[in-house]
Image (cartoon, helix red, strand yellow):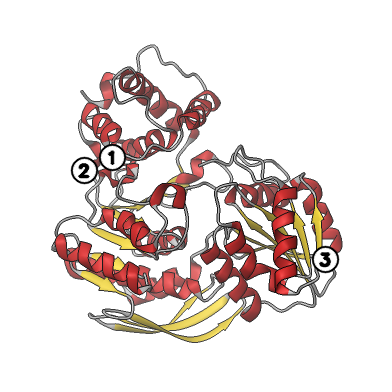
Amino acid sequence: MNEASFGSGAPFHTYTEAVDWVKGLVSFGIRPGLKRMETMMEKLDYPHRRLKFIHVAGTNGKGSTCAFLSQILMQCGYDVGTFTSPYIEKFTNRIQYNGQDIPENEVLRLANVLKPIADEIAASELGPPTMFEIVTAMAILYFAGTVYPDYVVWETGLGGRLDSTNIVVPVVSVITNIGHDHMDVLGDTLEQIAREKAGIIKPGVPVVCAAEQAEAVSVLRQAAQDKKSTLYLLGDQYAYEPVSSKEDEQVFHFSGPFRALKDVTIALNGSHQMKNAAAALMTIEVLRQYYALIVEDEDLYAAMKETAWPGRLEMLSRSPRLLIDGAHNPEGAETLAGALKHTYRYRKLHMMLGMLENKNHEGFLRHILPLVDTLIVTEPDFRRKLDAAALAGMAGELCAQLGRSIEVIVEPSWKTALRRLQQLTDRDDLAVVTGTLYLISDVRSWILYHSDSEKGW
């Protein structure tokens, strides 16, 4: 049965109705496993088999790495599909073709294609598809049936092994790093989490990896060996050497098994972005060697410099200076802390923080609290938000342990908290909004467009 067989008596008549249906599926939660995806693909005549995927997994850095890869491929003249999550402002952000969001009328059309299939699966022993499974299927249908990109840059949602994106066999797999996140689903140790991420490694498909912890690397090495996949590991097969770093400009040298690239410049901030950029370059090198990808150096250098990624160390305003960063786990907080120490200059640092319940809050706060002069604790507009007073209590206890005395302000309304943050921040100070991307998306939409975001997973 194929896509054209569906659509008579369309259940949805507007884009909003279609998106509301998809968002409503969130109540079925995250249920790892590929059986529902396999059934959907079978009913749609396996559209994913018509596409060339670059599959990207990792705890942090997936989005930035995907942004580098998409920009390079587009700059080199290829048509590129990009699938990322969560989206920052609008549902359509997550499915893009050559940097442009999927049109709203396509979302409507594809929702009408998928709804009967979803109902059929829901009535079976498999149970209803999840929100992420439907969005993944929508992306596949859009790319395979409407726009036909040369490559699809394909970001995992959660983990790898049982993630709905793992329905595909890619031309190259990328694992950016391994860290402590989604431990309620993926496992308590770095080895367990690495095992889940390693699930995207497919037989004979080359894999680029930037993980550095010995226990994670050992799991990934074994997985690549078991699948007879060539592993390109940061520090072994490829490396980068920082040359210089200042706000909005970092320069590094890249060296790999096929060639070296001197003085690569990126505009993304934070030393971790050089690592993400190096992983993207190694991936492009693999595509050049294995698939005869045509890349002119001039295009490559230009793309690296032009790559932008919203919501990660992004300066939203200059008066007052307000930086947003979706650091939502200890590794993200460590990266943010490094940038605040080495990249940005300020007299006082005022921070607004909102988190979800299921995160390692103490690990996050330990990296941030030593740097902050004022902490405004708020709540994201999301169902699994952490109570602001509870987060403030954790911050207070940790401050006592660390021997720090900082002002902690509790303001559950994020808009009120944002106003207070802006009022506190003098000309020589720096304001930072961080925590869950659900808060980041709201603040970004409010400051740039004075409108609420359509955020979601």
Q: In which quarter of the image is residue 178?
A: bottom left
What is the crowding at mark 3: few (fewer than 14 residues within 10 Å), some, or many (at least 20)? Answer: many
> What is the C-alpha distance between the residues marked 3 and 2?
52 Å
Which one is earlier in the sequence, the residue at label 1 or at label 3?
1
> What is the secondary structure assignment of the residue under circle 1?
helix
| Residue 378, disc | none
What residue is disc 1 on? Answer: 144
Measure how far apart labels 1 and 3 are at the Cα level: 49 Å
Q: Three-letter amino acid code at disc 3?
A: Thr
User: Which image quarter: residue 70?
Assistant: bottom left
Contact (Cβ within 8 Å) of mark 1 with mark 3: no
Q: Is mark 2 on a helix, strand or loop?
A: helix
Rendered residue at 42%/47% (across/down): 185
Q: What residue is disc 3 on?
A: 425
Query: Disc 2 marks which residue?
Result: 50
Task: Check the image and report above or below for 148 versus 13.
Answer: below
Q: Which residue lies furthest to the bottom in this view?
A: 243
Instruction: Examine the rendering and report whether any part of residue 102 can be seen.
Output: yes
The front one of 59 and 430 is 59
Residue positioned 60% across, 65% down in the render: 313
> As rendered, which of 432 and 265 lies closer to the eye?
432
Q: Position of residue 268 (x, y in %)?
A: 54, 70
Residue 162 placement (x, y as % from top left): 31, 45
